[in-house]
Amino acid sequence: MSTSIHHLRAAGTSFVLDARGTAVPVIIHWGADLGELSSDALEALAESQVPAVGPSSIDSAQRQSILPVVADGWNGRPGIAGYHEGVDGLVQPTFRLSGAEAVDAGLRITLESTALTVVVDIELTPSGVLRQRLTVTNTGGSLYSLASLDATLPIPARAREVLDFTGRWPRERQPQRRDLANGTWTRDARHGRPGHDNAFLMVAGTAGFGFRSGEVWGAHLAWSGDQRLWAESSATGHALLGGGELLEPGEVRLAPGASFESPWLVAAFSTAGLDGLAQGFHRFIRSRRRLGERKVMLNTWEAVYFDHSAERLIELADAAAEVGVERFVLDDGWMIGRTDDRRALGDWVVDPVKWPLGLHPLVDHVIARGMDFGLWVEPEMVSLDSTVAREHPEWVLGAGNAELPLPWRFQQVLDLANPDAFAHVHGQLVALLREYPIAYLKWDQNRDLLGGSAHRHTVATYRLMDALRAEFPGLEIESCSSGGGRVDLGVIERTDRVWPSDTNDSLERQSIYRFTAGLVPPEFLGAHLGAATAHTTGRTHALGFRLATALFGHAGIEWDVTTTTPTERAAIAEWVAAYKTYRPLLHTGEVVRADSADPARWVHGVVAADGASALFAVVAMAATRDAVHGPATLPGLDPDRLYRVTPVRLGEWPRFVQDAMPPWWDRGSVTMSGRMLHSVGIPMPLLAPEQALVLDVEALPPE
């Protein structure tokens, strides 16, 4: 058994664990890089961090271990909770260290009690992202009912401000901030999915931290089912971030010798505000999920809804091809008997009435026009008015209860944990993928579970996705969950795109992209150009604002482009061409977001990894505070290089409210150093509310 102090370093981050002796190891430091430290220096650091013993407390120094429990004097949320069934009296486990070894880029710590073994895997990735996962094994002689198994990480006393997210359909990932007072700020998700109101990312930082400033520590749970994230501060002087799967009583019962593995808690530290966190998370995700070129798509939902016919959809495919679309995705309405949202889910068979020749005429035409073909599915759901529900009512989740869960969008959940139900869905999807050259599945999930085991359902869904990807290696999958109800790093391990929200309202989308990109890289974020009047809000936006908003992600169209005017269609084609030009930058560069004194003006962009180019958007979210506002600063550029900044016309120029342009505009561009662009900025044309201006930034060759 190793009895040493372990120091992990990567990308400006250090993690130090004191694993001396037989007690549960203590996290000494997670934060700024401490540099190379000798064994003597690590010993000195560990000794220096032993706190005083407080009055009226346990008679030894209390420190935060990697598995805090009540028996060690911890009065906060424990790292593990549960009980052995049939054992008289409540026994609080006391763990001791039985093994600490270096494994790959991290550590494996083994802890033992009289009837449990817990293995803690800790990894500090090259991107600076820290991952922690726990595995508990029942070594006793009776069933162990597990209540919780959570990862925790310490934060310093100066991290007293907390940011997390909430929302609703279709307004996901709205920020909320508060001071971290004594107690626990907990965000539970009991949807059977993370949900539209998911905490998403729990961040603690120094007072007033922003996108570009402040020390911040952030944690996310890589899991697509019920979960919780929390920040906790105790009067004992301890503070931490934690997260884990949210288990219902009796949901996980371990027989003797059986094990349970928690999801990964994925965390990062930054001295450069929220953008520093985002860049660490993005590097981590890109190192694990390297995507191919993100094709411009057209999704048919808001173009035709359930009104399917080969003639109409072929006409739509022609219009899509004319503007440069590369992927055509047929949405809901293609299945047998699917005339509205009240029937036919679970019967994944092409409707012979709407499609007497199958989907072949449409698919063949799409491919002939140079596009590939995608298809909408909702494999986890079932309509009671369907063949599968009539023939197998026992496959409906909750069928063993007195009543089924409340209907949601007129549908129920198919119990994929049932092997027969799983085999049925898998077989029907495989049949479709074998008959048609389907390159892409839009995988929807339009309701909360409201019953059954969220753990078993999530595991079964992962297994189905993994099986299809293994059988069809080129297949891409989009995670859609009535919009943004399932956006997490668990599902991103096995999908190629997430749909951040069901709204195509550009004003709402600006906010949703702004904060979703704090964790998820732009190439994973579906960004669609919708109709002038948004389906979800009824708000109307100019074409230029919609085009600028949909540029900064994985671009697509959700609009009946057969109804557009020649001028609109030309503008869309111009935008598609611009996206194709900029996507290598947009999908590999670093996301940057400027802090602004005026909450009505946002600046965001993507800067190439080598600093040679960037693309920014200046956005007027509302009427600005001042009639003539100050220069817009462009962060993230190389301070010592010269850059030419040029406005980009996307189909049309935004609307300005002014008597004269800034003089540099009339010259067509302005040249400044990266340091000046970041520190001084450029006066901008006065944008009308709900307008956006895109700027191309190119480094000049050295003289």
Image (spheres, rainbow, N blue to C red):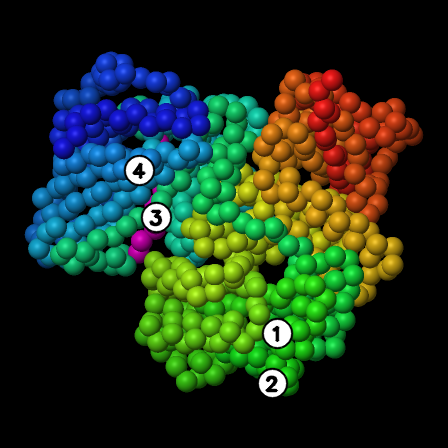
- Residue numbers of the magenta segment: 240-248
661 magenta-colored: no
Kind of residue at badge 1: Gly
247 magenta-colored: yes
Residue picked out by circle 4:
104
Name the quadrant of the N terminus: top left
Q: How far apart are marks 3 and 4 (CA)?
A: 19 Å
Q: State the mark number for residue 333.
A: 1
Pinpoint residue 427: horizontal percent, then vertical percent: 43, 75
Indicate left or right for 403 with 315 as reference. left
Q: Is residue 370 above or below residue 130?
A: below
Indicate left or right for 30 with 537 as reference. left
Q: Nearer the viewer, residue 603 or 607?
A: 607
Residue picked out by circle 2:
352
Mark 1 and mark 4 in contact? Answer it, CB < 8 Å: no
- Reading the chain from its start, which is encountered first: label 1 or label 3? 3
- Reading the chain from its start, which is encountered first: label 2 or label 3? 3
Kind of residue at badge 4: Asp
Q: What element carries label 1?
A: loop
Q: Is residue 36 above or below residue 30?
A: above
- Badge 2 crowding class, 10 Å Cα cut-off, few under 14, some 14 to 19, many 20 or more, is some
Q: State the mark number for residue 263.
A: 3
Pinpoint residue 201: horizontal percent, then vertical percent: 47, 40
Kind of residue at badge 3: Pro
**Does the rendering let one see residue 273?**
yes
Mark 2 and mark 4 in contact? Answer it, CB < 8 Å: no
Q: Is mark 3 on a helix, strand or loop?
A: loop
The dominant secondary structure in magenta is: strand
- Badge 4 crowding class, 10 Å Cα cut-off, few under 14, some 14 to 19, many 20 or more, is few
Pinpoint residue 493: horizontal percent, then vertical percent: 44, 51
Q: Which of 376 and 453 is in front in this view?
A: 376
